[in-house]
Amino acid sequence: MEMEPVHLSQENGRSVLYADQVLKDGKLIGVSSGRMYSNYYRQMISLCSIDSEFSAIDGEVHIIWGNPGTRQKVIRAKVSRFPFLNEKRNEHVDVNTIPCGALMK
């Protein structure tokens, strides 16, 4: 997988998305973006896309935070599913049973 990290900057008054490298055993397996601190979980959360072979829940990966050429930090992370809340989920709903066009006139 060939990926170059993209980092947050301002161009013409607009924010540009950044992404950090996600590694497993030193191998680049994906990119991470949108890191934030969760007051609910009292820990950092980061949304990432990784190769499916490394997507086992609770698997450990490493994320390199920081711009290339500047100070960077390697962060340990655990793979979790998204969304990570156990709210009512609709993944098993048969969408073919939803009336189509019956209410539209």
Image: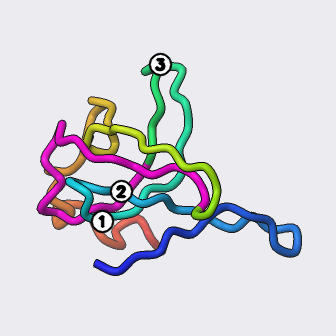
Q: Which residue is mark 1?
A: 28
Of labels 2 and 3, earlier in sequence is 2
User: x%, y% of residue 43?
Assistant: 45, 25
Identified at 23% across, 54% down, the residue is 24
Q: Which residue is mark 3?
A: 42
In this rendering, the answer to whether 102 lies above or below 64 is below
- For label 2, the SS is strand
User: x%, y% of residue 56?
Assistant: 13, 47
The answer to whether residue 79 is magenta is no
Q: Which residue is mark 2?
A: 22
- For label 1, the SS is strand
Q: Which residue is nearer to you in this view: 99 or 46?
A: 46
Which kind of residue does numbered mark 1 sit on? Answer: Leu
Residue 89 appears left or right of 49: left
Report if the CB atoms under discs 1 and 2 are less than 8 Å apart. yes
Identify the image quadrant of residue 88: top left
Looking at this view, name the residue that lies furthest to the right.
13
Q: Which residue is nearer to you in this view: 51 or 20?
A: 20
Looking at this view, name the residue that lies furthest to the bottom.
2
Callout 3 crowding tier (Cα within 10 Å): few <14, some 14–19, many ≥20: few
The answer to whether residue 52 is magenta is yes
Identified at 67% across, 61% down, the residue is 8
* Magenta segment boundaries in residue numbering: 47-67
Identify the image quadrant of residue 102: bottom left
- For label 3, the SS is loop
Which kind of residue does numbered mark 2 sit on? Answer: Val
Callout 2 crowding tier (Cα within 10 Å): few <14, some 14–19, many ≥20: many
Callout 1 crowding tier (Cα within 10 Å): few <14, some 14–19, many ≥20: some
User: x%, y% of residue 9?
Assistant: 74, 64
Identified at 36% across, 73% down, the residue is 101
- Estimate the spatial distance between the alpha carbons at disc 3 and disc 1, rounded to whole Å: 28 Å
Identify the image quadrant of residue 94: bottom left
